[in-house]
Amino acid sequence: MLRVFQNDILDPEQFVVTLELVPGRESTGRAVDTVMGIARDAFNDGRISAVSITDNPGGNPSLSPDAIGYRIFSIGMDVIVHFTCRDMNRVGMESRALQLAMMGMKNILALTGDYAGKGFGGQGAPVFDLDSVNLQIMLMMIGQRINAAGDPDAFFTGCAVSPFKKTEGECVAQYAKMSRKIAAGAQFVITQLGYDARKFMELIQIQRHMDLAVPTWDRCTCSPPGRPS
């Protein structure tokens, strides 16, 4: 039976834990077997609501989160697919979104993405036709088309924010863009990697001040969602 991340994250009584996996550059073999083994252990453990799968982290080529995500999804573990704007233009991103919908993987973490790293033959050319705010809008509109076609389950999208910046100005810019992402349709928020509990609390306080009542959790500590009241 599929464990449904959306049900868990929207339940205020639920302590939500997600597990992030970083696929390697192999399409088969020990590395893939290891990732699948971790996913199976997470499913059997029963405390993990979803496995979150990165999309070419650092801009470097790795196994597609869509491919490994579908294998994990097939064993009954819900997945959150990272979806970046770096490697495709808007046509490619819309096509990818339709593919994910057809595969049943509708939990998406919408990200602008890291700058392109090195792939075959050298430095990759970044695309960035859309940014994470535009991507949220695109996914929301595709979701409306999915509903109109008779599927009641549209995309369940989230966004990232980093309260762990060095200067106040950088943090304010993060919070301002977070509010735009939520206005564009983001339904949950996950922080970038950080280890400062005080800054995480600042993020929750900012959300309360801005009346942004979305489930939010810290990427590094697997803390329960902060639920601004």
Image: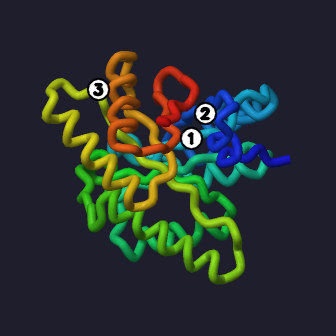
Q: Earlier along the polypeptide chain: callout 3 or callout 1?
A: 1
Seen at 70% across and 74% down, the residue is 151
In the picture of the structure, the residue carrying the numbered disc 3 is: 164
Could you say where residue 162 lies in the image, as x and y percent from the top left?
32, 34
In the picture of the structure, the residue carrying the numbered disc 1 is: 52
- Per the model, the C-alpha gap separating discs 2 and 3 is 20 Å
Q: Are the residues at dot 2 and dot 1 in contact (C-beta closer than 8 Å)?
A: yes
> In this rendering, which labeled residue sits more in front, label 3 or label 1?
3
Q: Quadrant of residue 124?
A: bottom left
Look at the numbered disc 2 and give the secondary structure of its residue: strand
Along the line of sight, the residue nearer the viewer: 136 or 10: 10
Look at the numbered disc 1 and give the secondary structure of its residue: strand
In the picture of the structure, the residue carrying the numbered disc 2 is: 18
Q: Pointer 1: residues within 10 angstroms few (<14), some, or many (20+)? A: many
Query: In the displayed structure, would residue 7 be above or below residue 207?
Result: below
Amino acid of disc 1: Ser
Could you say where residue 158 lies in the image, as x and y percent from the top left?
48, 50
Q: Residue furthest bottom?
A: 149
Could you say where residue 228 lies in the image, as x and y percent from the top left?
47, 35
Seen at 27% across and 61% down, the residue is 128
Seen at 61% across and 66% down, the residue is 154
Seen at 73% across and 27% down, the residue is 47
Q: How is the image coloured?
A: rainbow
Amino acid of disc 2: Thr
- Per the model, the C-alpha gap separating discs 2 and 1 is 7 Å
